[in-house]
Amino acid sequence: MSLFLGFDAGGTKTDCVLIDSAGRLLAETRGGGANPMRAGFARACDVLGETAQRALADAGRNAENIRAICAGVAGAGRPRVARRIKSYFLHAFPHAAVRIVTDIELALSAAVGDGPGVVIIAGTGSAVGGRNAAGQVARAGGWGPWIGDDGSAYDVGRRAVKAALAARDGVGPATLLGEKILLAQETHDWQVVIGRIAKRPDSVFPQLFPLVTASAVAGDIVSQEILAHAGKLLAVLAANVVTALGLQDRSFLIAKSGGVFSEPSQLESVLSAELFRVAPKAKIEPLRVSPARAAAELARKSVAASVAHGS
């Protein structure tokens, strides 16, 4: 039986879905981050391979039956990245057709198929992309942690550490964040935390996002302001895409994807309020289908289309 693999590879986690030719879900697995621009190509390929092999093992199936693979990979908008990831899959699964897409393309497909819509991705990183009824596409953000990723979990975590240290130095308002960050990092020494950040910031900053939301719920004003600011930053990116596509007065879907939207917070409420000012007829909701499942379906449909066209 023909099998199809779909991947959603981000900065913090990678989801893999295995389905059969009838679209039945056979297995779902999760691994670490596989964004090549953050983890490196070797690590990214290791994670993709590990999640695929675990999915096959869980389903009791063989790699030789994989007919097609579709992987949504953060950073795949860079041709060099897409080529190297595709080369890895072609080597690992020589009988499979391989398609590499960006995380935005994949999220759009999961949200609206080939139709018009906008997707806001906010996990370890952040980016916004969209398409109008004429097929015109636009995107904003996605420039990485050094010059972008506004409103992402990385951004929120970085601002939380900065606020905690400002409070410690007496140059910023009091906040619960300092104590909570040290507790989460299992240390009493800020130098230990700074050392970890210097060595591998992705292992620290994104992981602090739930801590910031919990502090906000507990009434911490600094945490609430950090989340509200993140919501405004994401709204600016989304508004630029909406305007570029001429969707301001149209009815369309704005889909949210990523760990930042895993639970309600000031970030989401501010984001929604700002978006409704720009696009009052838009409908804002989470993705109905996981990106990894959407990728697997894209792989399956690509083979079906090839058969239908006799190729």
Image (spheres, grey):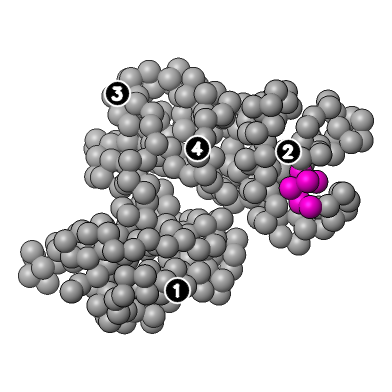
* Tag 1 residue: 49
| Label 3 sits on residue | 250
Q: Position of residue 298 (x, y in %)?
A: 26, 57
| Residue 80 lies in the magenta-colored region | no
Work out how far the residue at label 1 is from the one at label 3, CA to CA, in angstroms: 42 Å
Q: Residue furthest right?
A: 170
Position of 75 with respect to 179 (left or right) is left
- Say whether disc 3 or disc 2 marks the residue closer to the N-terminus: 2
**Residue 211, image x, y percentages:** 67, 39
Front-lying residue, 133 or 22: 22
Q: Quadrant of residue 181?
A: top right
Q: Amino acid at mark 3?
A: Arg
Q: Helix, strand, or loop for circle 2? A: helix
Which one is earlier in the sequence, the residue at label 3 or at label 4? 3
Span of residues in magenta: 181-186
Mark 2–mark 1 contact, CB under 8 Å? no
| Residue 117, x across and y down, in percent | 32, 36
Residue count near mark 2 (Cα–Cα under 10 Å), binned few <14, some 14–19, many ≥20: many
Q: CA distance from mark 3 to mark 2?
A: 37 Å
Mark 1 touching mark 3, by CB under 8 A? no
Mark 2: amino acid = Ala
Q: Amino acid at mark 4?
A: Phe
Residue marked by disc 2: 160
Residue on which disc 4 sits: 261
